Amino acid sequence: MDDMDAPSGPRAKRELPFPYDLDLSGVLRNLNRRTRWGRDRLANDRVTAALLAAGMRLLERHLGPGVRQRVNSERLLLGSLSQRRVAEEFARNPAPFTRYGNGVSMLRDRWSPHSDFVTDLITFAVWRENYRPEFREQRAANVRRLVHGTDFVRAVHDIAYQHTAEGLGLPSVRLGLALMTAAEGDEEVTRIISTVYEDYLGSWKKLYATVLRERHLQLRRGLTLDDLANALSAATDGMTLRAIGDPAAGVVDHAHRSSLMGTVALAVIHAFLEPDDDASGLTLEQAVAARFDRRP
């Protein structure tokens, strides 16, 4: 059995860095095998992991952070992911990823056409496990601060800065934001983005529901948990884009570990939520009108 078809045993799989050491059979949907067993086996093959690692390095070099290249037609979105470039990057793989063999042949064996590789790489790149190994631990700490902490305002500011700053440094986040502008007309990319947001917002909605329950708060009449999650998510995306495209805008202040996102998050929370025992019953529009409309 040659290097191209050699399966990764459990031991070899465990030796790979996170998240390549995880089961990728549910992530890679376009592998060129007829049976489910064949696709699952290939998804956890050491060469497949090595090709993904090469593609991820190209994405990081292409999208940043730290990109110092001029924007041109070659660099737009996924222009760096040709078979030739992925194969060249594969040959430069660091240990413990394999780097031996004909990278183009290996790509064609696993993904035909090449667009299937690009689609699976996108899915892998924006997969939640690809964000950071300590994601779950950090989420649990955030829940404790927001639910039980004595300084709710400080917790919101700290978490907003942390979340926005981390997004700036992750190629997966940058790729997701870039793809959103190009998703229209591409059903597969639209599906990927939709799935990512469904999972992403689902986890945040659980956190918000816990905060509302434990802090004895409720949404204003006419607003839903989906509205709250979408508003905060859209604001975060906007802040991240602005900070990437216009660092001088100061929406993220690394020196003081603060961000405008914290202020916006507090504004949304204040506008959307009311105490259970002192709810006005007004919609957001009615509450704003009561404050700003002129009286005759």
Image (tube, rainbow, N blue to C red):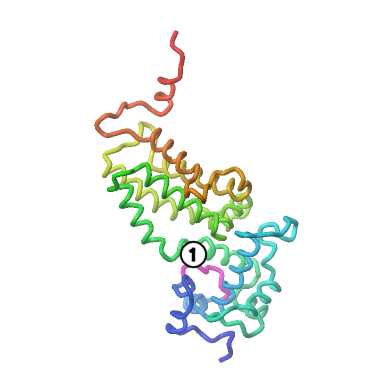
Magenta span of residues: 24-32
Where is residue 47 shown, x and y percent of the image?
A: 56, 80
- The amino acid type, in three-letter code, at marker 1 is Asn
Q: Is residue 31 magenta?
A: yes
Main SS, magenta region, reads loop
Considering only vertical position in the picture, is 123 above or below 198? below
From the image, which quarter does the C terminus lie in? top left
Where is residue 262 shown, x and y percent of the image?
A: 45, 43
User: Circle 1 sits in a helix, a strand or a loop, which is it?
Assistant: helix
Q: Residue at x 41, y 39 (%)?
A: 266
Q: Which residue is mark 1?
A: 130
Where is residue 74 shown, x and y percent of the image?
A: 74, 61
Considering only vertical position in the picture, is 20 above or below 231? below
In the orientation shown, which residue stands out farthest toward the right?
73
Left or right position of 162 against 177: left
Residue 190 falls in image quadrant: bottom right
In the orientation shown, which residue stands out farthest toward the front?
255
In the orientation shown, which residue stands out farthest toward the bottom?
1
Left or right position of 48 against 12: right
Q: Residue at x 66, y 58 (%)?
A: 77
Quick one: label 1, few (<14), some, or many (20+) residues within 10 Å? some
Left or right position of 97 against 214: right
Q: Nearer the viewer, residue 189 or 291?
A: 291
Q: How many marks?
A: 1
Residue 31 falls in image quadrant: bottom right
